[in-house]
């Protein structure tokens, strides 16, 4: 008997650990996609972050403090995510938060010298 390979369902996890399927990603509001995108960049969840980008999350989305996903990843020391984000089309490397810090400044201040 030949078994058919089960197709893996791609999922994104929200802050509570709840799974959101790819088909439901399109139903999320732009604000919610951006919030989840920033969360996954901060936590270092590369695959979830990339799925949200593909679903329409804004590369330059900012939270209430003005932090972008690039700033969150740089502050957290997630070098792979910083590399991915810094090479994305449309990313603003000079964007500042409400204090005036850029992603590079966040990396330096958080002692993430490898990223800086």
Image: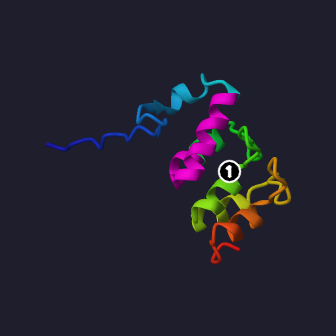
Question: Does the magenta segment cover residue 46?
Answer: yes
Where residue 75 appears, x then y in whole percent? 63, 61
Residue 76: say if magenta.
no
Q: Quadrant of residue 39?
A: top right
Residue closest to the eye, 76 or 100: 100
- Would you say the magenta stretch is mainly helix, strand or loop? helix
For the point 86% across and 59% down, which residue is it? 94
- Give the structural element (helix, strand or loop) at label 1: helix
Q: Quadrant of the C terminus?
A: bottom right
Left or right: residue 24 versus residue 30 is: left
**Residue 54 point in image, percent of width and height:** 64, 42
Q: How many labels were placed on the picture?
A: 1
Residue 17, placed above or below residue 26: below
List the single residue furthest toward the bottom: 114
Q: Is residue 42 left or right of residue 90?
A: left
Q: Where does label 1 land, which residue?
A: 69
Name the spot of residue 105 as percent of width and height, x first: 76, 66
Please determine whether, in this image, residue 7 is positioned above or below residue 86: above
Of residues 86 and 77, which is closer to you in this image? Answer: 77
Identity of the residue drawn at 77% across and 44% down: 66
Percent x, y for residue 9?
Answer: 41, 37
- Categorize mark 1 by other alpha carbons within 10 Å: few (<14), some (14-19), many (20+): many
Q: Start and end of the magenta stretch?
A: 31-49
């Amino acid at each position: 008997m030949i078994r058919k390979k089960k197709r893996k369902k791609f999922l994104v996890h929200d802050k509570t650990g709840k799974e959101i399927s790819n088909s439901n990603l399109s139903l999320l509001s732009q604000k919610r996609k951006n919030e989840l995108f920033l969360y996954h960049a901060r936590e270092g969840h590369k695959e979830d972050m990339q799925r949200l980008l593909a679903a329409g999350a804004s590369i330059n989305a900012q939270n209430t403090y003005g932090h972008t996903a690039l700033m969150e990843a740089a502050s957290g020391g997630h070098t792979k995510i910083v590399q991915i984000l810094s090479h994305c089309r449309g990313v603003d490397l000079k964007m500042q938060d409400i204090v005036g810090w850029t992603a590079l400044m966040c990396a330096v201040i958080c002692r993430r010298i490898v990223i800086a």
